Image (spheres, coloured by chain):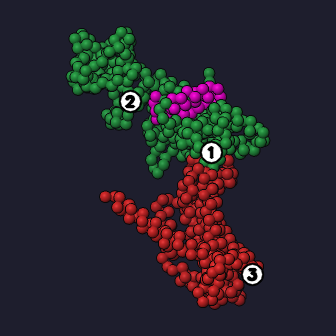
Chain colours: A red, B green
Amino acid sequence: MQQPFRTAVLVLVWGWLLLLVLAPNLLVVGASVMTRDSATFISLPLNLDAYRQLFNPLYLDVFLHSLYMAAMTTLVCLLIGYPFAWALSKVPKQRQMLLIFLLIVPFWTNSLVRTYALKLILATNGLLNNALMSLGVIDTPMQMLYTEGAVIIGLVYLLLPFMILPLYAVFDGLREDLLRASHDLGAGRLSTFIHVIVPLTLPGVLAGIMLVLLPAMGLFFVPDILGGSRNLLVGNVIKNQFLDARNWPFGAAASIMLTLAMAFLMLAHRLSKRRIGEDGV
Amino acid sequence: MKQTLLSLSDLSKQFDGKTVLDSLDLEILDGEFITLLGPSGCGKTTLLRLMAGFEHPDQGTITLSGQDLTHTPPERRPLNTVFQNYALFPHMSVFDNVAYGLKMEKRPKDEIRQRVNAALAMVQLDDYARRKPHQLSGGQQQRVAIARAVIKRPKMLLLDEPLSALDYKLRRTMQVELKRLQRELGITFVFVTHDQEEALSMSDRVVVLKDGRIQQLGTPREVYERPANLFTAQFVGEANFFAGCVDAVNGDDTITVDVFGLKRTFRKPDFQVFEGQPLHVLLRPEDIRVLAPDDEDGVAGRVVERNYKGSTLDSVIHLDDGTEVLASEFFDEDDPAFDYRLGEPVKVSWVDGWEWLLPQEAAKAEKEALADA
């Protein structure tokens, strides 16, 4: 009785993975080593021109700036998310569920819509400037929209829950007796934090970084709406190559670079988990 | 005479309005192996945590050699703990786990290496210094936890049910090992357990706890042979209680008690007795003598259960009046085939003088004691 069901599920899952994950990725790899063609988008012969183009100083600058903005986003998310997740794990269990629910509620609104809402807040005549001026903090409106800061705020706003949730998971699993043991052996709060809490929550930190840093380089609509023309992400470059510049091989090569960065982070995460005796995910 | 090392006076602790410790007094002597014994929820773990400093009492004081420790945080108490599930740091090697306490004291590297190696040698884990805790067996993790806890040479070692996660054989080995360590180190051990056998075999003194109060404090022999109340008698070891009634208080420090219609003469107990007073006659299973059905002595009954235990034959005997009696008899070399048939008629007796008398307690308390045990 169970055997046909089992087979059906396995076929479905493997079919799904092959058709919708492996095949598209292979197509991207294929496209990246082909030649640009204005009529058919890609054509033979095979070559590595697209990868060479990645190291073009112009694009290298865009990539580095994108990495910088994504890194800042991750850092801000970590600085807010780490204490937030810690405090969350300390409140009574029932309230915890409510708070996590509130954290997830914004996902029910489209992120594009929420980014436009953020634009209304940050605009020159927006809510924030008006509020600050009526409070007398500033005299003239500040330029907040179309800056690097606006992009980072937008990315943090969209991605913070992805940092908090894995951190909450590690704090929730942090054994109280390990902290007691540390105090028992003569460590104060700071020493316990450095020697026990940080290493034991590191897998959560890395998981959070993984879930924030890479999407932060790809969420092209955030700079489109909040960033103006100079604050581009890798995601914008990829989108532009496919849709505007019609340079598929180059767009594909940039995508693969992002995927490799993801793989590298996953490897680091796995190693950090193995270090404390848990199996990698 | 040993000196008092840690003195707890009038300690009370409540959690969510539930009293866990009820104005408890206890003096722990320097160098002794003292065991806190009781069923779960009796307050033994809370008591240990108060000593370690993980919890603070609502009322009362804790002093160590005359110095008030009541509000001192755990990191500044010269005591160390062996935790129930070992609480080894999973991200550190065995060496780093054991070295942790010394690193916190900022000892020189050479000294740390020397002392850690010595501690690991003491628990026979020299070859495992580089392993991670998850690569060790339960027994080995236990040894690491002990080495880690004694490396700072604490005045006192607190052990929170440290053997409960080990299998029976390993537990016996570790019991012997812990006793050896305690002798060698000369450190005071405060050992928490719910296993009465463990408590009796390891301790110099046993504290029997129930509902946050000390039921009895004494040597294992005192607690087992002369229990202070019904609860202790029931909790520590197996026990038969026979209902008795004082028939006469004799002049020669003895009393005559009516048990199952038999008039037996017992030593006069410490508590007040008067004629007609009902009391409990406590007899351990090994004090019971099972006799042939045609014997003059004893009370008639039938064997309803027999359990071969290797060195002893344990049986349950149903007396004619409905009382169940547990008996535990050693095998006799002259009669290696000695056994009972189920349903076999026998007579039950005991040697006068081996009994222990307890007064009747208030009906409710008594029922609870019997139900808990």
- Give amino acid for label 2: Gln
Q: Residue beneath label 3, please?
A: A58
Give x and y (percent) for residue B343.
Answer: 22, 22
Q: What residue appears at the point 58 percent right and 37 percent down from the top-left corner?
A: B140
Q: CA distance from mark 2 to mark 3?
A: 85 Å
Q: CA distance from mark 3 to mark 1?
A: 48 Å
Q: CA distance from mark 2 to mark 1?
A: 43 Å
Q: State the image coordinates of residue A131 (x, y, percent, origin top left).
A: 63, 84
Of helix, strand and loop, which one carries label 1? loop
Q: Name the subunit of mark 3.
A: A
For residue B91, which numbered disc appears in the image?
Answer: none
The quarter in which the N terminus of chain B is drawn is top right
Highlighted magenta segment, given as a residue range = B170-197
x and y percentages locating residue B277 in the rendered image: 30, 23
Which sits in the foreground, B324 or B8? B324
Q: Is residue A171 above or below residue B277?
A: below
Reading the image, the residue beneath label 1 is B132
The kind of residue tagged 3 is Leu
Q: Are marks 2 and 1 on the same chain?
A: yes
Q: Is residue B367 left or right of residue B178?
A: left
Mark 2 lies on residue: B234
Q: Is residue B362 above or below residue A191?
A: above
Can the viewer see residue B194?
yes
Name the N-terminal-most of marks 2 and 1.
Answer: 1
